[in-house]
Image (cartoon, rainbow, N blue to C red):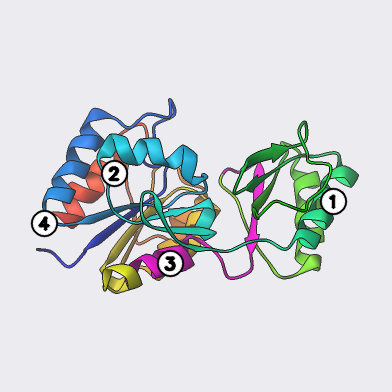
Amino acid sequence: MGKYKLLALDMDGTLLNDDHEISLETTKWIHKASQEGIHVCLSTGRAASSALPYGQELGLKTPMVTVNGSEVWKSPRELWRRHLLDKEMIRQMKEIADEADSWFWAYTTEGLFNTERWPASLEGFEWLKFGYNTENDELRHEILIKLQNLGGLEITNSSPTNLEINPQGISKESGVKEVCGLLGITMEEVVAVGDSLNDLAVIQAVGLGVAMGNAQQTVKEAADLVVASNNEDGIVEVIRDHILV
């Protein structure tokens, strides 16, 4: 057995190709890693409900990090820990979106709300993550400044055109740390793979941080290793050349 025991995989732009599918070759190598005793953990900005089908497709029974670390699952259907955003913070973030006339969305434990469908009251919901999406770089920067002024928030992205907001200190890094605690391993024994700013902290914190070939430049610069893109089975390269060796 090599020195790595956990493979933490981002989903969109990493595990999934641009058609939102896991290639046969990637599936084959994930199965090989699992058979060799490597824990394979989905580490995603997605809600559990949209991550779970892919976990099932791969036959994973391992812990899972969803909503950028706001939820940690002991096993695919067993919640271990959940971190919520303050409702007042949600109200203020929506206000910023309205002022900027920006598309916005938010995950609750009940499901997704967005610009076109927003509840009359914030009460009665548990808020996990808030997000903005705009192609306008200047507008996105203005929103970012306002969010930074609010304080108490963890601000990342999952694509160059969005901003994703979690409670301060909550990230894929904090989520993967919790998973390590559950499995009795250290962060040094983890390989983390991703492509966006919501992967940055965990890539910097683990034994081997890997950026996909299609990753944002900041992520590539912070990673120990850059592999092929999500459409060219970069995950296969990670498992074949760096874990099962």
Task: State the residue in front, 7 or 77.
Answer: 77
Instruction: Read off the residue under disc 3.
Output: 204
Q: Which amino acid is tagged 4?
A: Val
Which of label 2 and label 1 is nearer to you?
A: 1
**What quarter of the picture does the C terminus occupy?**
bottom left
Q: Mark 1 falls on what kind of element?
A: helix
Instruction: Report how far apart the C-alphas of labels 3 and 1 lie in the structure.
Output: 31 Å
Proximity of marks 2 and 3: CB atoms separated by less than 8 Å? no
Q: Which amino acid is tagged 2?
A: Ile
Going from N to C along the chain, the mark reached first, 3 or 1, is 1
One can see residue 13 in this view: no
Magenta stretch: give its range. 159-180
Going from N to C along the chain, the mark reached first, 2 or 4, is 2
Q: Position of residue 93 (x, y in %)?
A: 79, 54
Tell me the residue at 48%/40% (across/down): 49
Instruction: Read off the residue under disc 2.
Output: 235
Give the residue furthest to the top.
19
Going from N to C along the chain, the mark reached first, 3 or 4, is 3
Give the residue furthest to the front.
124
Q: Locate residue 118: give its quadrant.
A: top right
Tell me the residue at 90%/46% (across/down): 99
**What quarter of the picture does the N terminus occupy?**
bottom left
Task: State the residue in front, 210 or 188.
Answer: 188
Instruction: Report how far apart the C-alphas of labels 1 and 4 lie in the structure.
Output: 50 Å
Q: Mark 3 falls on what kind of element?
A: helix
Going from N to C along the chain, the mark reached first, 1 or 4, is 1
Instruction: Read off the residue under disc 4.
Output: 245
Q: Is residue 94 above or below residue 169?
A: above
Instruction: Read off the residue under disc 1.
Output: 96
Q: Is residue 164 magenta?
A: yes
Q: Position of residue 142 (x, y in %)?
A: 81, 53
